[in-house]
Amino acid sequence: MASYYHHIAALLCLIAFTSVVAAADNDDGGSTLGASYIFGDSLVDAGNNNFLPTLSRANIKPNGIDFKPSGGKPTGRYTNGRTIGDIVGEELGQRYYAVPFLDPNSTGEAILHGVNYASGGGGIMNATGRIFVNRLSMDIQIDYFNITRKQIDKLLGASKAKEHVMKRSIFSVSIGSNDFLNNYLLPVLSIGARVSQSPDGFVDDLISHLRSQLTRLYQLDARKFIIGNVGPIGCIPYQKTINQLNEDECVALPNQLAVQYNSKLKDLVAQLNDNLPGATFVHANVYDLVMELITNYAKYGFTTASKACCGNGGQYAGIIPCGPTSTLCTDRTKHVFWDPYHPSEAANVLIAKQLLDGDKKYISPMNLRQLRDLDH
Ligand SMILES: *[C@@H]1O[C@H](CO)[C@@H](O)[C@H](O)[C@H]1NC(C)=O
Ligand SMILES: *[C@@H]1O[C@H](CO)[C@@H](O)[C@H](O)[C@H]1NC(C)=O
Ligand SMILES: *[C@@H]1O[C@H](CO)[C@@H](O)[C@H](O)[C@H]1NC(C)=O
């Protein structure tokens, strides 16, 4: 069962990460990350939805075409290569990619290198993503971590387990986009939310749910957190196509909602840092980071920030999701967006770089390398 991950490790070792992996071999907790426990939506799902009866799936070609460990086969990642979660884990010295919780391979020692609970279509609210029939919402993702937490106790014994979770693990949370795209902004399916709630009321609800969700993780001994805000969801090829916008325009309402939520999220992160002793919550300003890539795409080597590399329909290939019959762009490194919704691996690499080493404009109060090295 474990050989898949050994295979990945072997490839990583040979191809790119020799020095990082060699350092991890000391396994002394020095400057290597033990594990990342990843919560969120399709931006970081690494295959959970493969195991759900759902309409939101990415284990179809040509997704994963640049994902070396699978030889270019789809894995369930909603991009052409690695997700931000994969890249950050590698760079921080984690030995294996965090394994999807629903994958039968997520047993035994594998879970000590990280587990991924993220699910395409998932959101903060239980009702979010109903359009896909099935997905793991944040409450359920945390229920699943509660199961993992007990397994870590069994593997390491209570005291070493606590130290592993508190000091050697990072908890990343990238959630919220679907609460707008696949809940609040879908009037028919979310009759409850949109008709009965003002944007203010809905945003407050999201923040209050997220507060209790993050507090539950804290109760399970999570101490090092990175919380991503919602990106400029009005600028994705899907939104730009259905609203027939010009290249340099974005749809106003989705971006306004994101900005409104993001402003309250920032306050929440500050409050949690004040109120939960021993915990460090790092805030990732994904919105400004992705907006910078979109606005100044040429500066970063892209030729378009509007058109999906893989997709079909309309001016920006933004209507029909990426699949075997999609038109595929000729150079995948030149597109900010892989498909109508998700960034390409090339964009993920640039985003991850800022999270790892960036300054307070994008990641505060410290970056992820500093968070990893923090010893409470
Ligand atoms: C799980 O491990 C088996 C055996 O190593 C491997 O063949 C399979 O592809 C893995 N499953 C997934 C979903 O990664
Ligand atoms: C969401 O669903 C979970 C699991 O079914 C449940 O425990 C939780 O209370 C629900 N949350 C809300 C806000 O309804
Ligand atoms: C974890 O699960 C146990 C039951 O096994 C439950 O009593 C506890 O409240 C759960 N903790 C959290 C934070 O959800």
Image (cartoon, rainbow, N blue to C red):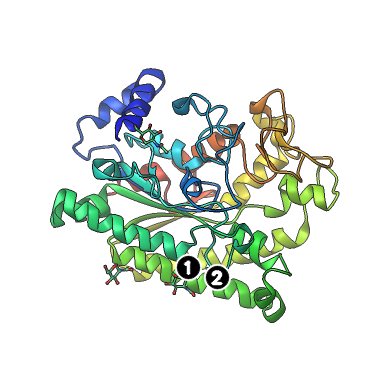
181 is higher (above) or lower (below) than 60: below
Q: Is residue 47 left or right of residue 149?
A: right
Q: Where is residue 369 in the image (x, y as percent from the top left)?
A: 38, 41
Determine whether 47 is above or below 252 in the image.
above
Q: Residue at x 47, y 67 (%)?
A: 210
Q: Camera-side residue: 299 or 222?
A: 222
**Is residue 283 shown above or below 275?**
above
Q: Residues within 10 Å of mark 1 (few under 14, many from 20)?
A: many
Q: Where is residue 178 in the image (x, y as percent from the top left)?
A: 61, 59
Question: In the rendering, at what x and y percent does residue 365 appear?
Answer: 43, 54
Q: Where is residue 217 in the image (x, y as percent from the top left)?
A: 35, 63
Quote the CA–CA distance across marks 1 and 2: 6 Å
Assign the C terminus to one quadrant of the image. Answer: bottom left
Q: Quadrant of residue 334?
A: top right
Decide: marks 1, 2 in contact (CB < 8 A)?
A: yes
Kind of residue indicated by mark 2: Leu
| Residue ID at (57%, 28%) | 65
Looking at this view, name the residue that lies furthest to the front.
53
SS under mark 1: helix
| Residue 259 visible | no
Locate ligand 3 by image quadrant: bottom left
Amino acid type shown at disc 1:
Leu
138 in relation to 74, above or below: below
Q: Residue at x 77, y 38 (%)?
A: 312
**Considering the numbered disc 2 on the image, is that residue within a helix, a strand or a loop?**
helix
- Say which residue label 2 marks: 206
Q: Mark 1 points at which residue?
A: 210
